[in-house]
């Protein structure tokens, strides 16, 4: 979604979790963020990936 909808290019890294997407002046780590939020139910309820996308969308040029 960050790449397709917001036009952010991928910045690939050796470790997949460290791969980044640039949106405007910000760099986002979607795989690392997703892994952190999937670790427990509490973290899933506290912050959804939809909120993460909407936050990134604010930085779209």
Image (cartoon, rainbow, N blue to C red):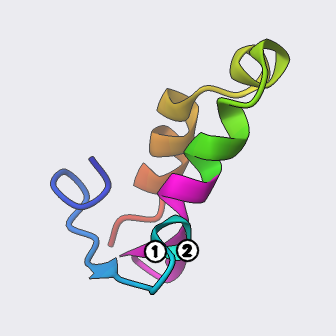
Q: Residue furthest left?
A: 4
Q: Nearer the viewer, residue 56 or 36?
A: 36
Residue at image position (24%, 61%) is 3
Closer-to-camera residue (48/12): 12
What stretch of residues is rendered in magenta? Answer: 20-32
Residue 26 in the figure: left or right of residue 45: left
**Residue occupied by mark 1:** 20
Mark 2 neighbour class, 10 Å CA radius: few under 14, some 14 to 19, many 20 or more:
some
Residue at 25 percent across and 58 percent down: it is 6
Mark 1–mark 2 distance (CA, rounded to whole Å): 6 Å
In this rendering, is residue 16 above or below 1? below
- Which quarter of the figure is the C terminus placed in? bottom left
> How busy is the neighbourhood of tag 1: few (under 14 within 10 Å), some, or many (20 plus)?
many
In the image: residue 49, left or right of residue 43: left
**Element carrying mark 1:** strand
**Residue 44 percent coordinates (x, y):** 70, 20
Instruction: Left or right? Give the position of 18 relative to 41.
Output: left
- Residue 2, image x, y percentages: 32, 55
Which residue has dot 2 on it?
18
Is residue 31 in the magenta section? yes
The residue mark sitting in front, 1 or 2, is 2
Residue 19 location (% of width, % of height): 45, 74
- Secondary structure of residue under mark 2: helix
Residue drawn at x 55%, y 42% is 52
């Amino acid at each position: 979604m960050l790449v397709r909808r917001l036009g952010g290019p991928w910045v690939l890294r050796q470790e997949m979790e460290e791969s980044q997407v640039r949106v405007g002046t910000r760099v986002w780590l979607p795989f690392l963020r997703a892994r952190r939020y999937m670790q427990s139910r509490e973290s899933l309820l506290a912050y959804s990936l939809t909120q993460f996308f909407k936050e990134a969308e604010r930085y779209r040029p």
